[in-house]
Every structure is written in structure tokens, then in C-alpha cells.
Image (tube, grey):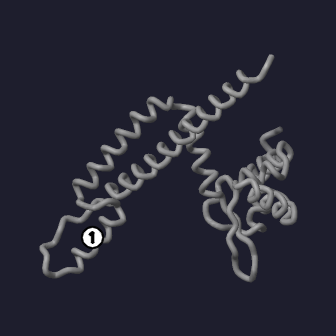
Amino acid sequence: MSADDPPETFADVNEAVGEEWEADTTPYERIRHVIAHTYTPVSVAAVADDARTAPKTARKHLNTLADEGFVETTPGEHGATLYQRSSKSLVVEQAADILAQVSTDELVTRIGELREQLAAYQSTYGVDSPEELTVSETNQTLSESRAPQQEIDPETLRDWQTLRRNLAFANAALAVGHAEQFVDDDRRTTDESLPA
């Protein structure tokens, strides 16, 4: 290329990546990937567009994923069905991720620590949850009979909510871990009782 030649036109990078993704995956894989990151209800057309497939194909695979429990459906306007990631599948995935990184013994210790942190929040603010704290703070602000109270830091509320979520996921992981142990123990018992 000489200095007088115009620069080459670059293809849209997003389109190139999308075409490569489409070539390397099946429609089912793309739809599952899209819905895995969809936490609010969306239409089949939106999923089909993001997954680079036809709405009919998207609907078929979304219905399969719904049957498997990976997707939740809700009614939309004019009788349309909306789709989103099921909370149950998200909890199971989070539990599996936790168990892949932490032993059940370590998890028991961590759950104890999380419970202590949660109890400290509850003791400090005199309520059971960040939502109750927000209501209490609002009620005190509206009440003219009480002296103004110091405003609660939004960061504190987020930390408290995150702590509760992490404790819930840790408890779910521990439950899954214990259930897996029972299943493994039952398999060993069944296998040992079979004649060789």
C-alpha cells in the first residue's frame, strides 16, 4: 500500500465477532447463553435477535429450557410469553461454583462468620433487615415528634443486602454439598451390596 492509497475499510468488529459466534455454536447454545444473562422478562424476539436465530427456533429452545427449569416464563402483553433466567437455576449454579472453590468444612466456618456479621448489623440498627431499616428511617424522618436521626449510608445498606445474599448462597451450597454426600454414600452402599 502506498501513501496515496486510501486505508482499507474495517468491517464492524461486533458483526465479525457475532458471525464467528454463530459459526462456532448451535442455536441452542446461543439461546442458553443469552438467557443465562437475562434477569428481567424479555420477548422471544429479543432473545432470538441477541442469539442470532429465528424467533421460531428461539421459542422452541426456550420452551425446552423452561421444561428443564433453566428458564421462567411470565405472561406478557397481548398473550405473549416472556422469558428470563430462573432464580432456581441461578442458585444451583452459584452453589456449584462455591462448592468447586470451598470444602464443606470451610463453608460451615464461613457461614458462621457471615451469621455473626449479619447479627452485628441487626444489633447495631435494631432491625432484622436493610429493608426494615429503610422503613424505620423513613418513619422517623416523617415523624416530627422525634429528633432527627443520622441518615443511613447507602453503602451500608448495599453491604447488608450483599451479606444476606452471600449467606443465602452459602447455605444453598452447603445443602447441595450435604445432599451430594448422601447421594454418593447411597451409591456406595448400593454398589457394595451388589454381588460381584
Q: Position of residue 32 (x, y in %)?
A: 74, 52
Amino acid at dot 1: Ser
Q: Is residue 11 visible?
A: no
Displayed quadrant of residue 76: bottom right
The answer to which of 78 and 10 lies nearer the viewer is: 78
Q: Position of residue 100 (x, y in %)?
A: 57, 32
Q: Which residue is mark 1?
A: 136
158 w.r.t. 41: above or below: above
Residue at coordinates 85% horizontally, 48% vertically from top-left? 26
Residue at horizontal 77 percent and vertical 47 percent from the top: 17
Which sits in the foreground, 49 or 176? Answer: 176
Q: Is residue 55 above or below residue 10?
A: below
| Residue 183 visible in image | yes
| Relative side of 111 to 133, left or right | right
Quarter in which the C terminus is drawn: top right
139, above or below 162, in the image = below
Q: Quadrant of residue 88?
A: bottom right
- Image position, residue 4 (x, y; %): 80, 45
